[in-house]
Image: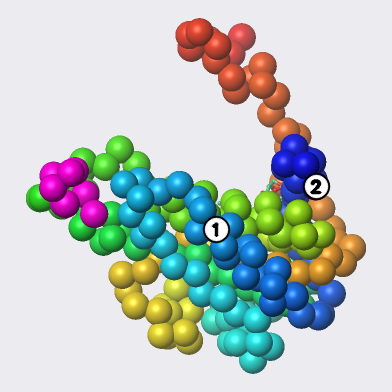
Amino acid sequence: MELGEVILRRRMVRAFEDRPVDPEVVDRMLEHALHAPSAGFSQGWAFLVLTEPHDRKRFWDAVFPDRSDAGFVHQGLFGAGCVIVPLSHKQAYLDRYAEPDKGWTDRDEGRWPVPYWDIDTGMATMLILLTAVDEGLGALFFGIFPQHVDSFREAFGVPSAYTPIGAVAVGHRAPDVPSPSLRRGRRGTDEVVHRGRWRSPT
Ligand SMILES: Cc1cc2nc3c(=O)[nH]c(=O)nc-3n(C[C@H](O)[C@H](O)[C@H](O)COP(=O)(O)O)c2cc1C
């Protein structure tokens, strides 16, 4: 597929057939993720990859202990053949930028304009989403909410230095219900793009 087509076709898919994802496709998604840019080439990210049914069940038990809480939009989610949890590692950035070519030896978080560790992990995650589309699969990025992060860490032995920025469910698409959020409509370039100078909305 052409890049433009992949981008325009991408949308969050929330229902999947209960069958595995080709391991080669999983590898390709991860390989592409590792080509994301990262500040100082810190690459302070990690990806927990769950393809075995018992691992995926452990994941859903940790983050959606009561499946009915997931709402009608998400009931088809749990069959996804692969779950990838991208995690950001802030300390890798603080350490990288304390190196001589950067020189922020105080490791002061106040120096960071925005949390690059989360930005970079998000960029890598987008490459996973786009690769899924290119492979004819569907994917959903969704949040892991604060009350479930400890049980998630415990279930998979994830160290506290790594923060899950969310999770990606990938699989063979089944018919799904569009998110009610889409009723908001897509904002147009006229509204969000400011050419030459900031232009307030009229
Ligand atoms: C940071 C982030 C968090 C999101 N969290 C959820 C979520 O928890 N559950 C969900 O169904 N969709 C989630 N979404 C998907 C958005 O609802 C979706 O991207 C948006 O409605 C636009 O739809 P589209 O991606 O299909 O174009 C999330 C998207 C982003 C970028």
Q: Is residue 93 above or below residue 160?
A: above
Please give the name of the residue rendered at 81% of the width and 80% of the height, measured from the top-left corner.
19
Q: Residue furthest right?
A: 175
Q: Is residue 88 above or below residue 151?
A: above
Q: Which residues are magenta?
A: 96-103
Secondary structure beneath label 2: loop
Q: Taking 124 as reference, is 41 left or right?
A: left
Residue 33 found in image quarter? bottom right
Relative image position of residue 186 (x, y in whole percent)? 73, 33
Please give the name of the residue rendered at 68% of the width and 52% of the height, measured from the top-left corner.
130
> Marks 2 and 1: CB-CB under 8 Å?
no
Q: Is residue 140 above or below residue 69?
A: above
Q: How is the image coloured?
A: rainbow
Query: Is residue 55 something that shows in the picture?
Result: yes
Please give the name of the residue rendered at 31% of the width and 47% of the height, measured from the top-left corner.
40
| Amino acid at pointer 2 | Met
Q: Please tell me the numbered disc located at residue 33.
A: 1
> Which residue corresponds to mark 2?
1
Query: Is residue 71 something that shows in the picture?
Result: no
| Amino acid at pointer 1 | Ala
